[in-house]
Amino acid sequence: MRPHLLLAMSWFILFITIIFVCGFTLVFSADDERYLICRNLFDCGNIKGIGYPFSGSNRPDYCGYPGFEINCSNQVPEITITQSTYKVLVINNQSRTLNVARTDYRENLCPTLLLNTTLNPNLLNYTTDDHNITIYYGCPAQGPPTSYLLTQFPCSINSIEMTGYFTATDDFSFLGNLASNLIRYLESCDNSVKVQVRQSALEPIIENATVAKLLGALNQGFGLEWNANDTLCDACNSSGGQCGYDQRTKAFACNCADQPRDFNCLPSPPRQSTKETSNQDSLKIGLGIAGTVVGVFLGCWIMTIIQRKRRKAALLKSKDLPIAATPLSKGLATSTNLSQTTPSLTPSKSDIDKGSTYFGVRVFSYNELEEATNCFDSSKELGDGGFGTVYYGVLRDGRVVAVKRLYESSMRRAEQFMNEIEILAHLRHKNLVELYGCTSRHSRELLLVYEYMPNGTVADHLHGRQSNSGLLTWPVRLSIAIETASALAYLHASDVIHRDVKTNNILLDNDFHVKVADFGLSRLFPTDVTHVSTAPQGTPGYVDPEYYQCYQLTDKSDVYSFGVVLIELISALEAVDTKRHRHDINLSIMAVNKIQNHALNELVDPFLGFDKDFVVRKMVTSVAELAFRCLQQQREMRPAMEEVLEILRRIEKENYGAEKADVLDIREDDVGLLKHPPPPLQLSPDSTSDQF
């Protein structure tokens, strides 16, 4: 027998076997996989039977609630709450409380990072049995005016020797005139941290305060009450389901035996007699055999179709058809004139077959994407881009995607469509959104298909619908800045200018890693010129003032826009807000004024702890200085994107565990650079969210 026939027969036998197994599996399968998995509880150390709202070990994230993942390392259960790690001591499902202890105060009072306990009040709250103890660090050497309420201890943090105190009370009113002097002394300390202990552990400290007793109380932990849709969970459990969470809808899910449901499971049908059950089993066997037979015939038919297509493809290939485009400098095709590089973009019959490509990306049929988005159901809208609406979709292969539907009213939609495909098809970077495919240029509608980012945009978390989540701590914001700068530096190295850098175009995945998106306005930049003359396009509040005034686009235009993004990360304010004072409507102008007047603290988001945490204060100050440079009106004075990335990485590397932050000190010649800030854009208050 010929080798290729033997191989074909082997594949055919394997296909029949799969059909046979799948037929019987589908007939006799009863319980949904998520239901079976979420029934599992797990043990970790002394804590037994850990279930909802917790995930971890053998319980995937859809079996728990976001923010309640237990990490069981060396049989020590730990949970991360807003960037801090806690050892879990007790879980009480009846009272819905857990007892936790800070891991950074396990052995001494001098942790590397001085962080207050921060809770998301929507998920966790302190119990009535918790009590605050304040620890002060870096206090003046002369000592407090009265010391019997304070316990002194020496401390060395990152090789910095300092004096610390702790006290079990913040109410010094009974001291009379001494109270104000004592408060003034404690406020002069570099930093203060509030830690929590149980009321029962507080009494020995009040009687005789020592470092050893405080450490003992801290290791006994404190209580937290959780709120994770527990009422819905009770109803789900009562109906026979397993509580969980749907990552797609971002809502509670009741995992039932048949399928996940929103709230509770449907009642089970009445139990049938043995005779009826036997008859049903016979029917299932018959259906399984019938399904297998149908599968065999279907397999034969599919193989016949495949062979025909192969012969047809071979025939077309022999005719030496032209390809869509030829990559040029640095792996990218030129965009100066699409008609010159592409003989014809009109799809042949082979273009619209599944698997055909434009510029190397897959071409989807309109019907497939209409099906994926449930006929572009308005309930699946994720948001509006500059040139189209983005929808949530699920492809036939199960992939979750974002589908951009370009506006029919846009006169330049075909240009934006081809521009985005041409650029993204040749770019590969971990912080750039991946383009899965598109429709044919001559499809009923122009559609682009991207990877789906479940955590929305940075704008959502800073000043949008998720701004109260408390998830964007300073380390997360700095990481977002670094990853965005990395993506833009890569674009500039590839001779691409994004031209629409803004927080709405910076997407976040489940782990808050960045994906820069929306390349409809991007331009391929010739290597032999300093700028491109073009009409200003972009989003108000982010547009480079020199580009706006002189119609000259350069890579420094992206640097200016990124400077606005840095200020947004620092302040959590919108780039343009007509509700602010008329001098502060434009965030970039507002930020420059604050920095010039040494009032950075008035700009910083209070959530970051700028006034209390000297490490955060130092890092935010450094990032503000960098943003100040990016917002220079003259493009020659702005740093290159590669330099911006290097500075941000250095800030992250050097400033964790740094000394007390210096006061922001901008040289007089630097201040002079911005004595004439860019003129405000001529905008109507009703059009601030629209593009030029």
Image (cartoon, rainbow, N blue to C red):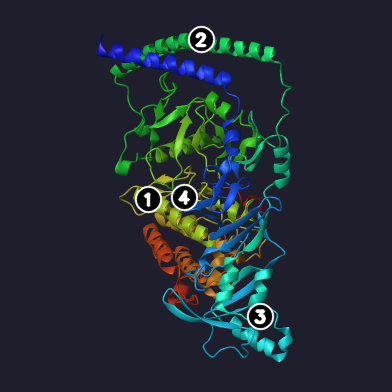
Q: Is residue 679 visible?
A: no
- Cβ–Cβ under 8 Å for marks 2 and 3: no
Residue position marked by numbered label 1 in the rendering:
490
- Residue 384 is tagged as none
Q: In this view, does 534 lie above or below 118?
A: above
Work out whether mark 1 precedes mark 3 in sequence or the reverse, and give the earlier one: 3
Work out whether mark 2 precedes mark 3 in sequence or the reverse, and give the earlier one: 3
Work out whether mark 1 precedes mark 2 in sequence or the reverse, and give the earlier one: 2
Rounded to the nearest angstrom, the CA distance separating label 1 from label 2 is 53 Å
Disc 1 crowd rating (10 Å Cα; few below 14, some 14-19, many 20+) is some
Rounded to the nearest angstrom, the CA distance separating label 2 from label 3 is 83 Å
Say what amino acid the circle numbered 1 marks.
Tyr
Q: Where is residue 633 in the image (x, y as percent from the top left)?
A: 47, 64
> Label 2's element?
helix
Mark 4 or mark 3, whichever is nearer to me:
3
Residue position marked by numbered label 4 in the rendering:
499
Say what amino acid the circle numbered 3 marks.
Glu
Q: Quadrant of residue 311?
A: top left
Rounded to the nearest angstrom, the CA distance separating label 4 from label 3 is 65 Å
Say what amino acid the circle numbered 4 marks.
Arg
Residue position marked by numbered label 3 in the rendering:
207
Say what amino acid the circle numbered 2 marks.
Val
- Cβ–Cβ under 8 Å for marks 1 and 3: no
Work out whether mark 1 precedes mark 4 in sequence or the reverse, and give the earlier one: 1
> Label 3's element?
helix
Q: Is residue 444 above or below residue 166?
A: above
Work out whether mark 4 precedes mark 3 in sequence or the reverse, and give the earlier one: 3
